[in-house]
Image (tube, rainbow, N blue to C red):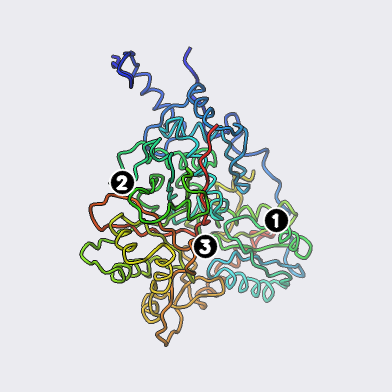
Amino acid sequence: MPNAILDPTGRAGAAKSPGPGLTLAARRPQLSGLRVGLMDNTKHNAALLLAELGKLLAAEHGATVTVEATKANFAAPAPADLMERYREACDVVITGVGDCGSCSASAVADGIGFEQAGLPAAVICSDAFVVTADAMAELRGAPGYHYVRTAHPVAVLTTDQVRERAKELLPEVVAAITEHGAP
Amino acid sequence: MTAVHTDSAGQAETELDADAAQAAIEYCYTRGWSDGLPLVPATRPLVEKFLATTARSPEEVIGRLPQLDRSVTVELAAINAAMAGCLPQYFPVVLATWDALMRERSTTGGGWQSTSGPAPLIIVNGPVRTELGINAAGGVFGPGFRPNATIPRAIGLMVRNAYGIHPHELEQATQGLPGRWSICLAENEEESPWPPLATEAGLPPGTSAATATLLRTCEFVDNRHTGNAEQLLADFADTIGRSGAWIFRHASAGIVFCPEHAQLLAGAGFDRAAIRAFLADSSGRSTAALAGVGKDACDDNGVRGPGHATDDTFQRMLPGSEAEHLIIAVAGARNAGISMVVRLFGGWSGTAVPVTGP
């Protein structure tokens, strides 16, 4: 009887993704009067893009930005105390921009974390990183998790181009966190 | 058909089943375990030989990536090292290397998933170099030597298999770099004019140890026609300070000196600290030169981009003259003035990890 070949992954017999699919936060009927959290991940133009989206959500949808913070380590999911700030003071969260190997995956992990805390999230991710973003969604038990894709690259855009990008993304961002999408 | 094998003592012959070996190798490919090259199929008796070389428990967790819900144990390290083609006696070096890498912030964060596709640089000091036959001399960046080739490969397989970080999935290297998972060298202590790297890093002289950090690339400095130490160092400064490698306010580097360069510098009175002081001062570019490539200014996060520079001050690339910002080792043949500048992914921990046995 030959010796068995050993599995080097430590996952022999493990399910491909942990547990059953997660339940996402309920989408909001509309955004008027709701509190919006913005969490940028330090990637170039991320804070500006989110700030512009926040202004548009206020001006066009009657929402109010209540938390505007930065996740210092883009490579890792947000720490618990930062997540808690949003949970306490927000109804919806917008986060990103996923535009590198680790930060795109961790942005999706953050989005799913917000969902589990009861906050519908719109994660903005460069379209060059959809494979790794999808892989993280599957790892977190939310295969097919919907995030907002934006054309790569974001980091080279000028201030005016970022404003333009925010306008283009607004309907998708609204659709990601509301029941019926953009009005 | 079977092949005839003569064992290392030349005293026995065994019939080996090459067809079965090929089938086992193909099985490993189909499971997605390979980095592209054939793997040694690991079995329990083989892995037990690896585990016998260390006092550490097979269950001990030696690395964890919470964001991926994955971890590496001593036993998984042994399985991957066996698959990489290591001999069991290499395993303590694999463990010390892994521990050295774990001292870097990037390896416990997003480094393995990075678009830069960084490669471990592994430098081995002490008696274990000769005990295992780790190449310290000619062709030290490879190939041709089993421990030099398989120890870094083991690290790569641990990342791939135990962490589940595969190219085109969670690993997002834009291009990666030549030599990823294949840069392991012994320091040429015999021809180095300076104390061993591990000694500089604080371990007692004569300690077998591994030092490791992550690299963005390596690039040679070929200078064999000056006997002037300052000219030679200026050539290194120019390569270290090039703008293409510079994306944040500062960037760290290293040099693997060939014996000829190291001895020339030592003869002129330069030790490691003096070399670092010289290069920390002189490696960089003028603001005007950086403006020309759109890297003259730093944003609030310390990321370089186009600014509105009008002055012509000299911007230094290295964060300082500490060892963490410019790792220096000696390796290679004593036959030409060819050294390697290495580009650090982040910084170096400034430490070395002792290689310990059972």
Q: Nearer the viewer, residue B313 or A100?
A: B313
Q: Are marks 1 and 2 on the same chain?
A: no
Given contact means CB atoms under 8 Å apart, are the residues at marks 2 and 3 in contact?
no
* SS state under label 2: loop
Q: Nearer the viewer, residue B150 or B331?
A: B331
- Residue B350: x %, y % from top left: 51, 57
| Comparing labels 3 and 1, the label whose residue is closer to the camera | 1
Q: Measure the C-alpha gap from mark 2 to mark 3.
A: 50 Å
* Mark closest to the chain's N terminus, 3 or 1: 1
The kind of residue on which mark 1 rests is: Phe
Packing grade of label 3 (10 A; few <14, some 14-19, many >=20) is many
Total of numbered circles in the picture? 3
Residue furthest right in the image: A88
The kind of residue on which mark 2 rests is: Ala
Packing grade of label 2 (10 A; few <14, some 14-19, many >=20) is many
Q: Are marks 2 and 3 on the same chain?
A: no
Seen at 26% across and 69% down, the residue is B228
Determine which residue is flagged by label 1.
A114
* SS state under label 1: helix
Choose top left, top right, bottom left or bottom right for residue B71. top right
- Residue A117: x %, y % from top left: 74, 54
* SS state under label 3: strand
Determine which residue is flagged by label 2.
B137
Determine which residue is flagged by label 3.
A150
- Residue B258: x %, y % from top left: 31, 55
Which of the image's four quarters has the C terminus of chain A? bottom right
Q: Are marks 3 and 1 on the same chain?
A: yes
Seen at 72% across and 66% down, the residue is A31
Q: Measure the C-alpha gap from mark 3 to mark 1.
A: 21 Å
Q: Chain of mark 1?
A: A
Q: Chain of mark 2?
A: B
